[in-house]
Image (cartoon, rainbow, N blue to C red):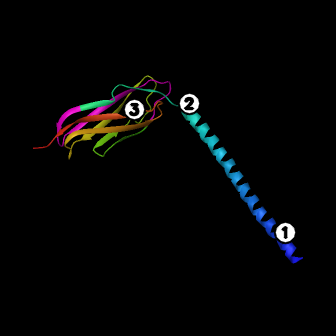
Amino acid sequence: MKKYFLFLVIPAALISCDVKRKDKISDDSKTDSIKMAQKKLADEEALKNTTTVEMIDSVYNFGTVAEGEKVAFSYRFKNSGSNPLVIFDASATCGCTIPEKPEQPILPGETGFIKVIFNSSGKHGHNEKIISVTSNARPLFPPLKLTGEVKEKK
């Protein structure tokens, strides 16, 4: 009798463990679908607040400078959309190039500037720097390019 009892209890215990596992998987999928729905709503809300940008200057060639000189240039752009343009971040490919983004939103129809300072100390020959801008513009803000020649200091 004890043998039959063990044959019934062991399979029942194994099946009940599997059911709990399936319930956990089911709960995870519900959580995932809720998170996906929340993300979709956040993305839709973000799209409502997007705008468009029209580049006036996206490439600047500073020509030839002597090593150690600093080159400054302000890239111009216009908010061509219907919502304020917010620049979240501006970064360059190296520490020798420092971009300064506008702190205030650029209102529709207004022109904004991203000032860039390039320090040619320790640089030689052809230099090309890319400035990446993160904003609420769609399509994305295009990369800004700074190029020129640096002659060795004599």
SS state under label 1 = helix
Q: Nearer the viewer, mark 1 or mark 2?
A: 1
* Residue named by callout 1: 8
User: Which residue extends farthest bottom?
Assistant: 2
Viewer-closest of 9 and 128: 9
Query: Residue 119's spot in the image, x, y percent?
Result: 24, 42
Q: Nearer the viewer, mark 3 or mark 1?
A: 1
Near mark 3 (Cα within 10 A), the count class, few <14, some 14-19 or many ≥20, is some
Do we see residue 100 in this rendering? no
Give the magenta part as a residue range: 62-87
Circle 1/circle 2 CB separation < 8 Å:
no
Q: Residue at x 86, y 73 (%)?
A: 5
Query: Residue 152's spot in the image, x, y percent?
Result: 14, 43
Viewer-closest of 122 and 112: 122
Which dot marks residue 44? none
Circle 2/circle 3 CB separation < 8 Å:
no
Which dot marks residue 48? 2
Circle 3/circle 1 CB separation < 8 Å:
no
- In the rendered structure, the answer to whether residue 50 lies left or right of residue 104 reads right
Query: Mark 2 or mark 3: which comes first in sequence?
Result: 2
SS state under label 3 = loop
Q: Residue at x 23, y 36 (%)?
A: 71
* Residue named by callout 3: 142
- In the rendered structure, the answer to whether residue 32 lies left or right of residue 13 reads left
Was residue 79 drawn as part of the magenta stretch in this picture?
yes
Q: Amino acid at mark 1?
A: Leu
Q: Amino acid at mark 3?
A: Pro
Query: Mark 1 or mark 2: which comes first in sequence?
Result: 1
User: Which residue extends farthest right?
Assistant: 1
Query: Residue 15's spot in the image, x, y percent?
Result: 78, 62
SS state under label 2 = helix
